[in-house]
Amino acid sequence: MLETSARLLKLLSLLQAHREWSGPELAGRLGVSTRTIRNDVERLRSLGYPVHATPGVAGGYRLGAGAALPPLLLDDEEAVAVAVGLGRAAGGGVEGIEETSVRALAKLEQVLPSRLRHRVSALNAYTVQIPGQGPSVAPEVLTTIANAARDRHRLRFDYTGHEGDSTVRDAEPYRLVHRRGRWYLLAYDVERGDWRTFRVDRMRPRVPEGPRFAPRELPGDGDVAQYVEKGVNTAMWRYRATVLLHAPADRMGHLPAGLEPEPVDDDTCLLRIGGDDLGGLAAWMGFLGVDFEVLDPPELAEAVAELGERYRRAAAATRPPTS
């Protein structure tokens, strides 16, 4: 009985690791007859594992999806990856997932071998995670979008803009991107005929799904992360600004990812940025360490002048240290 149970576990591991196996392939891997393989497959089915069999020369066995989630076999690297992922998920970002992640992590750590538990503990102990401050998103919204992207179905949804106005959008969803505590959707806006990046926390998907669409070539030479990063740094914000920096473009290599200065001449460059708060933008530009001019919008120039006056008053009121 012990030998049979061990063989069943090995068979299950093979089925989970490969899309499809022929009977002779499995028999050769396990050192048994094809008749034994058929009997073992029936035992797995009785335990709730949906093993599908295709007859014929080109047929074989594959593990499908069932009505309930059966136990899974993970190798060492997969177990560590899942444990670390659950730990990160417990930090938030998806509405209601923190408690669920902690429960799942507790179950996994209970059965982890000590050697793997030490690896996970070491990684967690020497890793610092800064939790995102963005709004949480309901899991069903994420799964609805992901399923529509996978099945290539157009998505209709209500979208709330910066000013609180709501519009109905019709788009072809392609990728979900998680960035600094916020979820974004890269999609092709059908009505506007162009690529758009949407804040997922501002989306309310409608049902049923729209018609299927033919896939398009992704923008930004296929680098979705960089494309979304660049778009979020400008178009997604309430305020967009153009600033002339009194420094060559190649001197601004310390800028955040997605912000690319445009050379004007050997001594100046343009920078296009965005933000939801003018005061925050004005303060951020002070950290660049170079002189600058605000070209647009006028409201940002006023915020910079106000901040500069506040600093001037603070400098005048600050007493020099006495020796």
Image: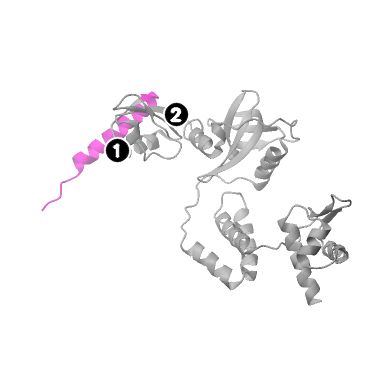
Point 23% across, 37% down: residue: 313
Q: Is residue 125 left or right of residue 198?
A: left
Local secondary structure at mark 2: strand
Q: Are circles 2 and 1 on residues that touch, CB within 8 Å?
A: no
Check the picture and name the quadrant holding the N terminus: bottom right
Residue 304 colored in magenta in the image: yes
Rendered location of residue 250, percent (x, y): 34, 34
Q: Is residue 14 left or right of residue 118?
A: right
| Residue placed furthest toward the left | 323
- The secondary structure that dominates the magenta segment is helix
Type of the residue with mark 1: Gly
Rendered location of residue 186, percent (x, y): 59, 35
Q: Is residue 183 above or below residue 105?
A: above
Quarter occupied by residue 287 = top left
Point 26% across, 38% down: residue: 311
Relative to the observer, which residue lies in front, 227 or 240? 227
Type of the residue with mark 2: Arg
Quarter occupied by residue 220 = top right
Residue under label 2: 240
Point 65% across, 63% down: residue: 75
Q: CA distance from mark 2 to mark 1?
A: 21 Å
Rendered location of residue 253, percent (x, y): 36, 38
What's drawn in magenta, residue-wise?
A: 295-323
From the image, state whether disc 2 or disc 1 is nearer to you.
1
Dot label at residue 289: 1
Local secondary structure at mark 1: loop
Relative to the observer, which residue lies in front, 151 or 277? 151
Point 29% across, 38% down: residue: 289
Q: Is residue 156 above or below residue 191?
A: below
Residue 258 colored in magenta in the image: no
